[in-house]
Image: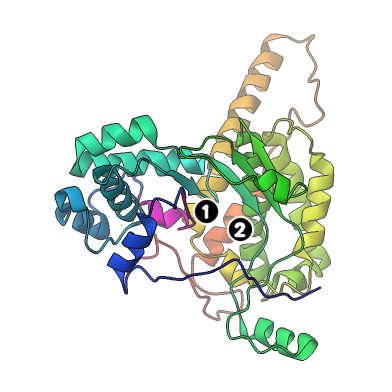
Amino acid sequence: ASARVIGSILEFVFVPADPEAALARLCSASVRIVSLTVTEKGYYRCTDGSLDRTAPLVKQDIDEWGGARGLAQPRTAFGLICTILQRRRSAGLGPLTVLSCDNMPMNGSVCRAVTLDFASAVDPDLAAWMERDVAFPNSMVDRITPATENEHRELLRSEYGIVDEWPVIAEPFLQWVIEDSFSAGRPSWELAMPNDVMLTADVEPYELMKLRLLNSSHSALSYAAMLCDHVFVDDALADPDVFAFLRAYMLEVVKTLGSVHGVDLAEYQRSLLERFSNAYIKDKLARLALDGSQKFMNTLQHALLYYRAQQELVCEVLAKSSWVAPAHKHAKEGTDIVALALAAFMRYAAGTDASGEPLELVDPLTDA
């Protein structure tokens, strides 16, 4: 483990506290990329993927739109993005790139869809300009970075003699895969970080690998381990039963993935189990358990539907052709461990553990 001061953050402006200062900075000609990480909830999508225009903050941004100046006080990510782009367009500054780093399938495409939907609601000409000139590349970021806890502050103080009220704890592993599609140029990240950054025309295989093996495994682990009275991820992995469950879960989920260029999927699974066991990270299971209904939908739903469709096709072929034998050893296997993970989520959603003690349930469907 090591500690260092990050010197690349030169300025911080909190948009809700000083929106005009933030907008002035973001509308500067020198700004070419706006990146965002707002989680699944921040996109306000309906079940069909479209923007939920009835959501209170979305509706407020639409109602308060002010023509060429956009919004004086944006309340949503796409309200802010559209205001930046509207002001840049009016000033003749040209487009910029909107780079989503959220843990969602095709995050750039999702961001583009809801942002264009918002733009269409407030200014069709802006929407047409954005559709033509503004890039929304897809990306995949793989690095475990837990929320800062008192344990992290104490670790920094005791081991490094540094007092910092908000240290950022991260694992050594880092992988950033980015679709090489930018509106106004980009830094040469691949030269600055050749072992960690990949520019590619197709992010999806890497994205699906991470979402289904890392993110969905995090969710599956959190509910099963919390029901076993564990608090930290590394402590849960030290439990032989939890470790065996998670390894079996990955072996089922990996069957929904195709090949990924340059990646050994068996080695990737092994490395994930090792990374999850990192005692220095002290990641809390409660963090991984947040918003489970949204996370499973984004990390596992499509995988399960695809897998079930493949199984139905295999069964149909086998039923019609007695001389055909499945070529893959997993061809007729089920998804018992994935079902167990979903059952653990539903048990967790009851709000109490096996001893009847309350569990903190934070999920957008809590009051549904």
139 is higher (above) or lower (below) than 6: above
Q: Which residue is mark 1?
A: 295
Tell me which residue sits at (28%, 52%) in the image: 83
Label 1 element class: helix
Label 2 element class: helix
Tell me which residue sits at (26%, 54%) in the image: 58
> Mark 1 or mark 2, which has the lower sequence index?
2
Magenta stretch contains residue 39:
yes
The quadrant holding residue 42 is bottom left
Q: Position of residue 313 (x, y in %)?
A: 63, 20
Residue range (magenta): 33-44
Magenta stretch contains residue 161:
no
**Nearest the eye: 47 or 228:** 47
Amino acid of disc 1:
Lys
Q: Position of residue 147 (x, y in %)?
A: 59, 72
- Circle 1/circle 2 CB separation < 8 Å: yes
Crowd rating for badge 2 (residues with CA inside 10 Å; few <14, some 14–19, many 20+): many
Query: In the drawing, does residue 28 fall left or right of residue 205?
Result: left
Q: Position of residue 307 (x, y in %)?
A: 63, 32
Alpha carbons under labels 1 and 2: distance apart: 8 Å
Q: Which mark is residue 219?
A: 2
**Nearest the eye: 112 or 228:** 112
Q: Position of residue 93 (x, y in %)?
A: 34, 44
Amino acid of disc 2:
Ser
